[in-house]
Image (cartoon, grey):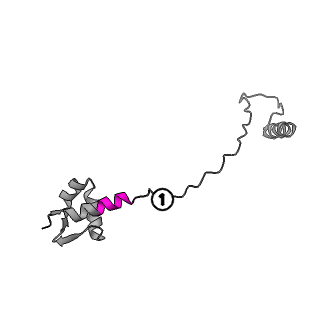
Amino acid sequence: MAAFTNAKNFAVISGRSVAEIRQMCKLQVIPNEKSGRDYLIDIDAAMEILKKRAANFEGHQFEFTPKPPKSEQVTMPTHSRKKTRKKTGSGFLDMLNQLAKEVQTG
């Protein structure tokens, strides 16, 4: 004679969550009978099925996609923000030209 229990008790016996047990019952993965709002689960048969599933488990399947390498970052020199009355020619375009020369030379 088979022993039956509800989903909450079977979750404790099997070490699974109640939601997972109810989902397995809904999908008919483990043998059960619907009794009102709950499921009555055949303990021995359900444990045998869970043991077989665990023995056949080959690991989670996923595809590994490596991230592209990060591009080399160039840091721009910063100039001081001192207010000067005289223009020194140290504007953005001058710094950009200087950086371009440094990249070309090496």
In this view of the protein, which residue sits in the foreground, 47 or 27?
47
Occupied quadrant, residue 38: bottom left
Q: Which residue is the site of mark 1? A: 61
Instruction: Determine crowd level at label 1: few under 14, some 14-19, many 20+ residues with C-alpha closer than 10 A.
Output: few
The residue segment tinted magenta is 49-57
Q: Tell me if 2 is positioned left or right of 73 in this view.
A: left
Q: Is residue 64 magenta?
A: no
In this view of the protein, which residue sits in the foreground, 82 or 65?
65
Query: Which residue ends up furthest to the left in the rendered image?
Result: 1
Label 1, secondary structure: give it.
Answer: loop
Q: On the rendered image, what quadrant is the C terminus found in?
A: top right
Residue drawn at x 30%, y 59% is 51
Percent x, y for residue 5? 15, 62
Residue drawn at x 82%, y 39% is 103
Q: Main secondary structure of the magenta part?
A: helix
At label 1, the amino acid type is Gln
Please tell me whether residue 40 is drawn above or below residue 88 in the rendered image.
Answer: below
Residue drawn at x 30%, y 68% is 29
Please tell me whether residue 28 is drawn above or below residue 8 in the rendered image.
Answer: below
Percent x, y for residue 39? 19, 67
Q: Tell me if 60 is positioned left or right of 26 in this view.
A: right
In this view of the protein, which residue sits in the foreground, 22 or 2?
2
Percent x, y for residue 76? 74, 36
Percent x, y for residue 58? 43, 58
Residue drawn at x 23%, y 65% is 45
Please tell me whether residue 22 is drawn above or below residue 13 in the rendered image.
Answer: below
